[in-house]
Image (cartoon, rainbow, N blue to C red):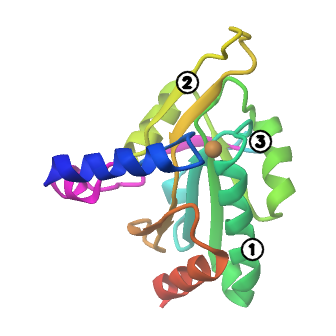
Amino acid sequence: MILRLFTVAALAAALSPMVLAIPAAPVAAQEAAPRISGRFVLQDQDGRTVNDETYAGKIRVISFGYTFCPDVCPTTLATVAEAMDKLGDLADQVVPIFVSVDPQRDSPAHLKEYVAAFHPRLVGLTGTPEAVASAARNFRVRYQINPAPDHNPDTYTVDHSAGIYIMGRDGRFAAKLGYLENADTLAGRIRQVAQ
Ligand SMILES: [Cu+2]
């Protein structure tokens, strides 16, 4: 059963025009694996050290990626921004977060500019390669650097799991949506988690 799901996921990835997205582990495999703890210790876009408890009491809408991402991250963050704007007053109880898995290029200052272009409330997080790897593990996110064909050290791409995680006010995993879900669906799920 697990094998079959892997095949389906691999096929979906092969057929997807967004070839940079690595499918997350299949659901059947997740059941046997450790749950998504959502723990992290990272730096925000202002250089402050933050962790998952920094946002206690807030619903967090979290995605992983990198600012040089050509398609998946801009699509995801545009959806998150649109959903925030649909939430009305509830948006005050929600923190949208983008975690960079490319700390080599995504400095806090660079992230700050990037996230501000999507939404004024969007938080950008990064950290040491070890801290980023640990955060990704705790969300079961995978990523991998692809060297540029011309070996230019500045133009590599990073394959990464796509998706949007909703963590409840208690910091626990509440829901995960695909990055192609629309803003109405995302806003609806956030409202459910808020109840
Ligand atoms: Cu991306």
- Give the residue number, with chain letter if any, for mark 3: 111
| Measured Cα–Cα span from mark 2 to mark 1 | 29 Å
Question: From the Cβ of disc 2, is ligand 1 less than 8 Å away?
Answer: no
Q: Is residue 95 visible?
A: yes
- Give the residue number, with chain letter if any, for mark 1: 82
Q: In this view, does 162 lie to the left or right of 122?
A: left
Q: Is residue 49 visible?
A: no
Q: What residue type is labelled 2?
A: Ile
Question: Where's residue 162, x and y in %?
Answer: 52, 51
Viewer-side residue, 189 vs 122? 189
Q: What residue type is labelled 3?
A: Leu
* Magenta stretch: includes residue 173: no
Question: Where's residue 152, x and y in %?
Answer: 74, 10
Question: Where's residue 10, x and y in %?
Answer: 36, 44
Question: From the Cβ of disc 1, is ligand 1 less than 8 Å away?
Answer: no
Instruction: Judge the density around disc 2: few (<14), some (14-19), many (≥20) Cα neighbours within 10 Å.
Output: few
Viewer-side residue, 100 vs 153? 153
Note whether 85 is above or below 78 in the view shown. below
Q: Nearer the viewer, mark 1 or mark 3?
A: 1
Q: Is residue 102 left or right of residue 108?
A: left
Residue shown at 20%/58% (left/top)?
A: 28
Q: In this view, does 106 lie to the left or right of 167?
A: right
Mark 2 or 3, nearer chain start: 3
Quarter location, residue 150: top right
Q: What residue type is labelled 1?
A: Glu
| Label 2 secondary element | strand
- Give the residue number, with chain letter if any, for mark 2: 145
Note whether 62 is above or below 190 in the view shown. above
Highlighted magenta segment, given as a residue range: 24-44
Ligand 1 - quadrant of the structure image: top right
